Image (cartoon, rainbow, N blue to C red):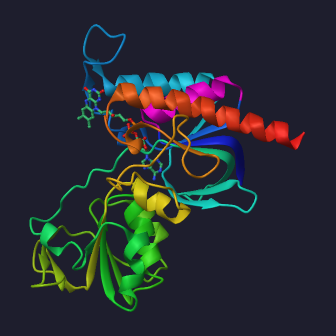
Amino acid sequence: MKEYEIVIIGVGPAGLQAAIHSARRKHKVLLLGKLESSALYHAHIENYFGFREKVQGQELLLAGLDAAKKFGADFIEEDVVKIEILEQGDFKLETEKGTVIRTKALILALGVKKKKKIFKNEDSFIGKGISYCVDCDAWFYKNKRVAVIGDGSAALHGAMTLSKFASKVYLIFLKELDDIIEELKNSPIELIFQKPVEILGEEEVRGLRFEGDLVIEVDGIFIELGAKGPLELLAPLGIELDPETFSYVKVDKKMQTNISGIFACGDLTGPPLQLAKAVGEGCIAGISASDYIKSLQKASK
Ligand SMILES: Cc1cc2nc3c(=O)[nH]c(=O)nc-3n(C[C@H](O)[C@H](O)[C@H](O)COP(=O)(O)OP(=O)(O)OC[C@H]3O[C@@H](n4cnc5c(N)ncnc54)[C@H](O)[C@@H]3O)c2cc1C
């Protein structure tokens, strides 16, 4: 198990700025996440302080990561699939590749997950067999047949979770990856690499039709693209959300959430969804997490 004082989930501008501030204060800091999943990666920025010309988001992210590493932050390019609060108030994290990490403070800089539609008739089945959250809805599919559609760690782990409840789990992977095939070799999950084109059913989901002639009968379809969505990852922790939208994490002026030792910043805490806000909040979260660690150290003396 790897141990850190501060772990930051997310390597967008909020997470990177948090890492720069906390690592510069000489803490043992780890960054987790993927640069290319940041909203900034494909953006061209014109409204950010300090640049006369349009600047590419990717360039800013690479420079930010270099700076965080220069100040001593470690970086593991993996998605987090599970967060637990331990009895002592520490946090335990598990990544998509099974790396287990323990930390005293956690900074959430997960951005927002954009819901991508796969099917034209998807919206009409929401709540009638279409779900975007395995951890929220798996229980409803006890002894039923389900399909998980995805392209990354969320789909793989969603399928594994569902295999504990459902009588049959199909994993429909939108891209072919050797390590996924290897990981599922001895599992009861059936992999399908064909492109799904239509949800079947009248009132409720009854099946899926693929390109070609393949049809499978299922009672539920989980759409899990990319990494685990912030709200799905945070739901088991009891993190308080903004009471008006239930889409963003509620924080105070120090970027502290309702759980001691957990801070949040950037798009995850709500609009404006802008680079300048993400960087500003990342700075505050990095400093607040550092102060929190120092207060723990003082109390233990
Ligand atoms: C096309 C486009 C154009 C834009 N143009 C502008 C602009 O001109 N000006 C402006 O100010 N803003 C612009 N923005 C918005 C800006 O990019 C965002 O506000 C900013 O990137 C938010 O930063 P963030 O760090 O909060 O989140 P993000 O940059 O989205 O980073 C989120 C991070 O969390 C990680 N993550 C998510 N889930 C997990 C998980 N389970 N495990 C591990 N890591 C995880 C991701 O890998 C990623 O690294 C634009 C955005 C887009 C999409």
* 218 part of magenta stretch: no
The answer to whether residue 142 is left or right of residue 257 is: left
Which quarter of the rendering shows the C terminus? top right
Query: What residue is rendered at 40% in x and 44% in y?
Result: 268
Q: Residue furthest right?
A: 301
Spot occupied by residue 11 in the image (x, y as percentages of width and height): 47, 37
Check the image and report above or below for 184 versus 257: below
What residue span does the magenta drawing correspond to?
A: 11-26
User: Is residue 78 visible in this depiction of the protein?
Assistant: yes
Give the camera-side residue of 271 and 3: 271
The answer to whether residue 15 is left or right of residue 120 is: right
Q: How many marks?
A: 0
Q: Quadrant of residue 241?
A: bottom left
Check the image and report above or below for 182 versus 114: below
User: Is residue 153 visible in this depiction of the protein?
Assistant: no
Query: What residue is rendered at 29% in x and 18% in y?
Result: 55
Look at the magenta stretch and give its main secondary structure.
helix
Give the camera-side residue of 53 and 105: 105
Give the camera-side residue of 230 and 36: 230
Query: What residue is rendered at 32% in x and 18% in y?
Result: 48
Query: What residue is rendered at 47% in x and 63% in y?
Result: 235
Spot occupied by residue 57 in the image (x, y as percentages of width and height): 33, 26
Spot occupied by residue 182 in the image (x, y as percentages of width and height): 46, 68
Q: Residue furthest front?
A: 244
Q: Quadrant of residue 289?
A: top right
* 22 part of magenta stretch: yes
**Ligand 1 shown in quarter:** top left
Spot occupied by residue 145 in the image (x, y as percentages of width and height): 31, 87
Which quarter of the rendering shows the N terminus? bottom right
Check the image and report above or below for 37 versus 184: above
